[in-house]
Amino acid sequence: MRLVVLISGSGSNLQAIIDSIASRHLDAEIVLVVSNRKSAYGLERAAAAGIPCLIFPFKPYRDAGQPRDLYDADLADQVAAHTPDLIVLAGWMHILSPAFLDRFPGQVINLHPALPGTFPGTDAIHRTYEAYRRGEVQHGGCMIHTVIPEVDAGEVIVKEIVPIMPDDTLEQFEEHIHSAEHRIIVEAIRRRIKQSQP
């Protein structure tokens, strides 16, 4: 399976995918890593693994007064040139519009560090932790879902509950979430590979 992975930050989930491919746990190839931030450490991880990278920031479009849809359409052109079977948003901090999603129906999946129906959008780990401290939730979690225009609301592929211990700091809870993310992102890709096989 040909994968394109979109990142914005450290790329630890990208690394989990790279490692799973190297250990033959995943029968896949990452054909391109895209970042909307030049400073994303994930680009170094990709380069170390010999994976082609594309830095594609929105800022030049914004500075030129061009709409988000044009950026998304141009990004879709760049990604489509690599003929991916699956596009994985692994910490991609940019909401994709139909100008991108309509080019790849059902082929875009996203990692979100909260459970279905809870804490959509940004800063979900911190918001979950604060809700736990207020007694509003019993635990956190994360999920991989199919991307649709509504934020973090597509069909769930894999989810995992992540306990919060009474003495956990926010940093400790974040570590638990990231460990779970690394497992479920690989599992979601594995399931998609299985579905694609005749």
Image: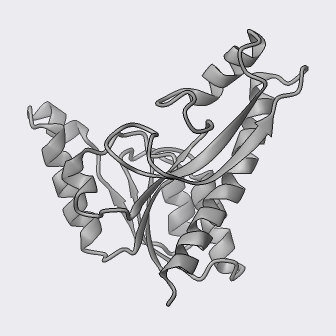
Q: Position of residue 24 (x, y in %)?
A: 68, 83
Q: Residue at x 52, y 77 (%)?
A: 195
Coloration of the structure image? one colour
The answer to whether residue 135 is left or right of residue 78 is right
The outermost residue toward the bottom is 198
Closer to the camera in the image, 89 or 51? 89
Q: Position of residue 105 (x, y in %)?
A: 30, 62
The outermost residue toward the top is 134
Q: Residue at x 57, y 38 (%)?
A: 116
Closer to the camera in the image, 191 or 178? 191
Q: Position of residue 26 (x, y in %)?
A: 63, 77
Query: Image quarter for residue 85?
Result: bottom left
The answer to whether residue 38 is left or right of residue 172 is left
Vertical comparison of 16 with 66: above or below: below
The answer to whether residue 32 is left or right of residue 76 is right
Q: Residue at x 14, y 32 (%)?
A: 63
Closer to the camera in the image, 191 or 5? 191
